[in-house]
Image (tube, helix red, strand yellow):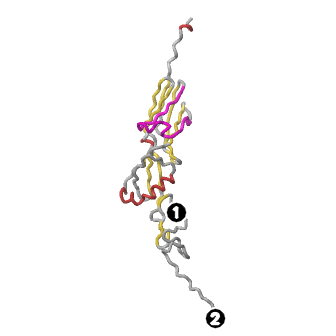
Amino acid sequence: NGQCITQPQEQLCGNNIIEVNEECDSANLAGKTCKDFGYNAGILSCNNCRYDLIQCRNIEVTLEAPKNLRATVQDNKVKLTWDYAGGSTITASVTGEVVSVNAIVGNAVRDVNLFQDFFSSINNFFKKTFTGKRVGIVIRELNYQIYISTGTNFEIISQGSARDYNCLDDNKCEFTDNVNNGIYYYKIKAISSNVESEFSEQVFINVKTPPEPEREDEVK
């Protein structure tokens, strides 16, 4: 009858085109990631045109609390010092296994998503090399919050980066607080984006400044 009949094209898995009854195809993941399947990290892949979640992970990120907080006083100035390294380690525990990661030198992990992306890109390497161990990522720039109390509630008196507290000079951080006579309690925490450490151990100090000597012209 002169009509041209078009034969249906054969569906192919592996042509990078998502067709009927295919979830994905090769590198074409239809914009999906591990997060679309309830994970917070990892690499989504495609196997026989079905999503493969074998490299998807849930990572719990914790930040170690600052250590060795000390307080000294001179005149009406309280000087706080603490160990920089003690408050600059992120530890990642992975669902079903513990995977080590090595140090990032000279970079700050400012966001959990950044850490997840970093972990995803090297996931297989660390699984093969460090399975069963736990090693922190050393962060070279953090934020700190410093809290003070006079015996009741604590309140923030200062917050800033590790550089603001001179942490990069000798791995010791320091902060000076101008106070009046009295008893003061201090504690600090480390923060990296939406990851916060526990509080450090608190310290207290009793500030007593001797009265100034009377001047001769004031003596009757």
Tell us which disc is closer to us: 1 or 2: 2
Q: Residue furthest left?
A: 129
- As for residue 173 lying within the magenta part, the answer is yes
SS for tag 1?
Answer: loop
Q: Residue at coordinates 55% horizontally, 75% vertically from top-left?
A: 19
Question: Which percent across, then down, holds residue 163?
Answer: 48, 39
Q: Which mark is residue 196?
A: none
Question: Which percent across, then down, holds residue 79?
Answer: 47, 30
Question: Which percent across, then down, holds residue 130?
Answer: 36, 56
Q: Quadrant of residue 123?
A: bottom left
Q: Which mark is residue 1?
A: 2
Alpha carbons under labels 1 and 2: distance apart: 51 Å
Q: Residue at coordinates 50% horizontally, 78% vertically from top-left?
A: 12
Q: Residue at coordinates 53% horizontally, 36% vertically from top-left?
A: 147
According to the picture, the residue beneath numbered tag 1 turns out to be 33
What is the crowding at mark 1: few (fewer than 14 residues within 10 Å), some, or many (at least 20)?
some
Front residue (pair 93, 170): 170
- As for residue 33 lying within the magenta part, the answer is no
Question: Which percent across, then down, holds residue 107?
Answer: 46, 47
36, above or below 72, in the image: below
SS for tag 2?
Answer: loop
The image quadrant where one finds the C terminus is top right
Q: Which residues are magenta?
A: 155-179
The first of marks 1 and 2 along the sequence is 2
Q: Residue furthest top?
A: 220
